Amino acid sequence: MPVIGLLREEVEPFYGQLKDMLRRSEVVAVGETGLEWATEDEIEKLKAQLAMAKETNIPVIRHTPIPRAPHKLNAIKKIF
């Protein structure tokens, strides 16, 4: 379930479910996750997902904006 576009109160219950899922043996990575527009909302959600990945020692598959998008370089810098 994508969390982009969800309100904070809608995302919080999902994060609890996501943490539980990340502890399952068949889960191999978090993602695809990243930034498309690098809004503050996207950045906040990405940070939460990265923290969960770190806590559970799960790799992350990152998303970057579409090729040649004018905002791509800015978003990639923020991702890394």
Image (tube, rainbow, N blue to C red):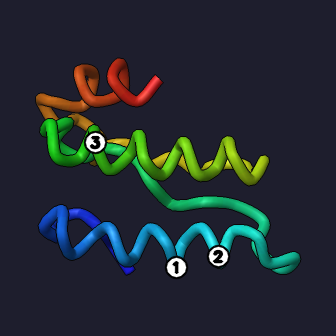
Q: Residue at x 40, y 30 (%)?
A: 79
Label 3 sits on a secondary structure element that is helix
Q: Which quadrant of the view contains residue 44?
A: top left
Q: Residues within 10 Å of mark 3 (few under 14, many from 20)?
A: few
Mark 1 lies on a secondary structure that is helix
Q: Tell me the number on the disc at residue 20.
A: 2
Residue ID for mark 1? 17
Q: Residue at 44% of width from left, 68% of height from top?
A: 15
Q: Residue at x 23, y 21 (%)?
A: 74
The residue mark sitting in front, 3 or 2, is 2
Residue drawn at 69 percent across, 46 percent down:
55
- Labels 3 & 2 near each other (Cβ < 8 A): no
Q: Is residue 19 above or below residue 69?
A: below
Image height of 3 relative to 35, above or below: below
Amino acid found under the numbered disc labelled 1: Gln
Q: Position of residue 78 (x, y in %)?
A: 33, 23
The answer to whether marks 1 and 3 mark residues whose Cβ atoms lie closer than 8 Å is no
Residue 13 in percent (x, y) is at: 36, 76
Q: What's under tag 2, amino acid-wise?
A: Asp
**63 and 14: which one is in front?**
14
Q: Position of residue 19 (x, y in %)?
A: 60, 67
Q: Is residue 34 above or below residue 32?
A: above
Residue annotated with mark 3: 44
